[in-house]
Amino acid sequence: MLKPVIRTQNGQTTTLPAFTIDVTGSTGYDIRTERFELQQGRIVRCLPEDALPDLYVTAGLINCHLHWLMLGGTSFPDLVDTIKNRPDEVLEQALENAARSLRNGITSCCDKGAPSYTTRRIYEGIEAARSNGKAITKTQYSPYMLVVSNAFAEDWCVHVETEADLEWVKKEWAETGAGIVKMIPESNFFPEPPHFKWVFDHALFAKARAYAQEKGLIFSIHGKGVESIETGIQARVDSIEHGLQATPEHLRQMQALGIFLGPTLEGFECRLNWSHAHGKNLVMAEYEWEKSTALIRTAAVLNEGKPFPNLIFANDAGSFNTPHGTLRELYLLRQCGYSPEDVLRIATINGATFMRKQTEIGQLAPGFAADMIYWTKNPLALEPEEWANLTDYIAAVVSDGQVVHLN
Ligand SMILES: [Zn+2]
């Protein structure tokens, strides 16, 4: 039986008093004591309190880069076969991962695409489970990742080599209710510089970009190499994932244009751990880990000691050996020099802005979804090392005004 962090009395539903941690300013944070009045899953009023509460409350976290249909394993050919031939198995595991993610405070997310073309039924199953009341993370989807021959992950993504291919994908985006276009415009890793090569057709890239703009879809590109990063900046994409070879000048341009960077440090750490354990792909894994952490250390002090603000919580959960439902990415951002309030801002406000839902999620204010995490300690007062076990401090998680987890 869940303890009531929410209670209904005389027809009014309110949360228990707690210290609200507010990171809506561009720097620093505010703490105040209040309760929230809720109606139909939303906050309708903030009620100041004098009592000294036991708990702290923040908005729910928003993971802007995960893959529900990738299960954190290491064999993608097998997974593609399972998706095609035994979709119910994938659905069951995806739902389990989405439930664990919500219990760990991830109330909303962006799915950046699945391996294989035959994914629609599984995504529909995830949505149906949520509508039927299953406690899982809310998701905005990109049902496919777009590639061409010789691109990274070309074996399990949708090839867009011709106008006809692009027309097929446009139809799919429209029919599946996709919110995001995700593209992998570059090659796999080469040991020699420049390590990654742009391989996408530039004209088709521009057409896909224009289509996303016209339809209001978020446009994200995989950007490990310099050409991808520079093309992405020029095209004013919404986010660049990984960004391994981004320079301080690239970061400044992204900052000026409001382009987000999804660091995926946890994904790189998981690959590195696997490579060490198996003695495979070490050159790539070490290059990616060193470049990604150096980039975020640079970003943390980009503006004369102040951070590059446009990071999103993006851990690549589900991709090669990377588990779902962890908050380790936030610990790694702290290790690279981001302050606790900046990390919280990244994982709430920035995610909401990236998803174009900045008036719906990511804040605890009237009109916003009642997506919240109750904490036993102030997460902003935890030592950097304690962020490695951030979930230990979660007392309760609320999604759309329902208590979905209680420790
Ligand atoms: Zn990914």
Image: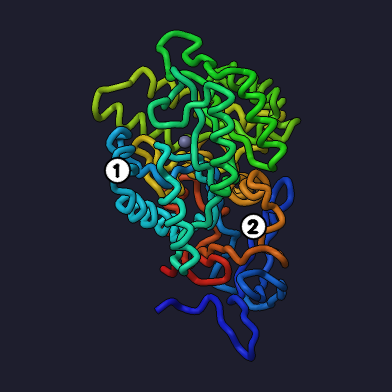
Q: Residue at x 45, y 47 (%)?
A: 120
Q: Quickly name the residue at label 2.
A: 361
Q: Which mark is residue 351?
A: none
Q: How would you rate the neighbour count of disc 2 (Cα within 10 Å): few for under 14, some for 14-19, many for 20 or more?
A: many
The residue nearer to you, when weighing 16 against 144, is: 144
Q: Is residue 146 left or right of residue 74?
A: right
Location of the C terminus by quadrant is bottom left
Mark 1 and mark 2 in contact? Answer it, CB < 8 Å.
Answer: no
What is the spatial separation of the Cα atoms under label 1 and label 2, in whole angstroms?
A: 34 Å
Looking at the picture, how far across and down is residue 183, in whole percent?
Answer: 54, 30
Location of the N terminus by quadrant is bottom left
Amino acid beneath label 2: Ile
* Callout in the foreground (1, 2): 1
Q: Quickly name the residue at label 1.
A: 82
Q: Residue at x 47, y 69 (%)?
A: 133
Report if residue 370 is visible in the image.
Answer: yes
The residue nearer to you, when weighing 329 against 121, is: 121
The residue nearer to you, when weighing 131 against 40, is: 131
Q: Residue at x 48, y 63 (%)?
A: 130
Looking at the picture, how far across and down is residue 6, in whole percent?
Answer: 55, 77
Looking at the picture, how far across and down is residue 155, in whole percent?
Answer: 38, 27
Q: How would you rate the neighbour count of disc 1 (Cα within 10 Å): few for under 14, some for 14-19, many for 20 or more?
A: some
Amino acid beneath label 1: Thr
Q: Residue at x 72, y 73 (%)?
A: 45
In the image, the residue with mark 2 has its CB under 8 Å from the nearest atom of ligand 1: no
Q: Is residue 115 left or right of residue 49?
A: left
The residue nearer to you, when weighing 391 against 126, is: 126
Report if residue 334 is visible in the image.
Answer: no
